[in-house]
Amino acid sequence: MARWMWIFLILVLVLSCENPFSIRMTADYFPLKEGNKWIYKVKEENYQVVVEVIEDRENLFGVDVGGDLQYFERKKGIVNKVRDLVKTYEGDKIYFGKVYEPYLFLPPIEGENWEREFTFFTTYKGDTVRKYLYISIDSVKSTDVILNNTKYNNVYQMRRKVIEDEDTLLQYEWFAPNVGLIKRVIMPDSIVWELLSYIVKE
């Protein structure tokens, strides 16, 4: 009987301590719920960006990012960015349809890396037009971050690379448990977003 009591006490102590594995498995690193709101300071540009979830349509969320409405699909284990693929060709805009671009796999895993590649073709005025999209995530690591006198534990830092036709976007992002994106560095100009305040509903 005494032996089982000791085992029980040890389990209670272990579970009551902050366990990074437990946090990673149970926390939400991309909390999408209508009314959730984040305010970021863009350091080099000296202005703020307000990000707010303004629409919830059964796992498809409309997110206002500084006046730009973006859509994200939330499914088990993954968040997809949903958008129309468009290319300007000979001065005209050509529509390639809707793409579900992998944005974030949940929960994050340290050391994880993945990539996705999409190639689309269509015919326009007798010409074959190609649309190319490549997304990759790597350099995922767990860390602690202090921003504006607030410490965030069990933060996942990652590098995101998006190539769309001839354009390349490279950025570093930090996601905190039950908060979401707390920091972003956009290359090559090193434009830094830092979280000032947030409202995340349970």
Image (cartoon, rainbow, N blue to C red):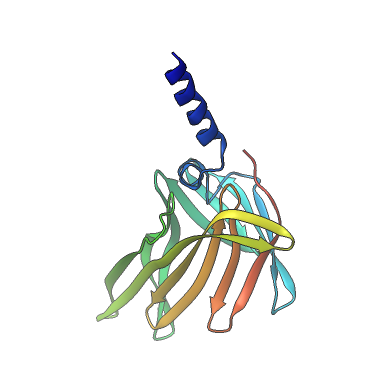
Residue at the farthest front position: 2
Residue that appears at 33% across and 74% down:
132
Residue that appears at 48% across and 19% down:
5
Quarter in which the N terminus is drawn? top left
Residue that appears at 41% across and 45% down:
75
Residue that appears at 43% across and 49% down:
107
User: Which quadrant would residue 135 be assigned to in this image?
Assistant: bottom left
Quarter in which the C terminus is drawn? top right
Closer-to-camera residue (145/178):
145
In this rendering, would 132 be left or right of 174? Answer: left
Residue at the farthest top position: 1
Closer-to-camera residue (145/135):
145
Closer-to-camera residue (99/74):
74
In this rendering, would 66 be left or right of 112? Answer: right
In this rendering, would 86 be left or right of 116? Answer: right
Is 170 located above or below residue 173 in the figure? below
Is 18 located above or below residue 104 in the figure? above
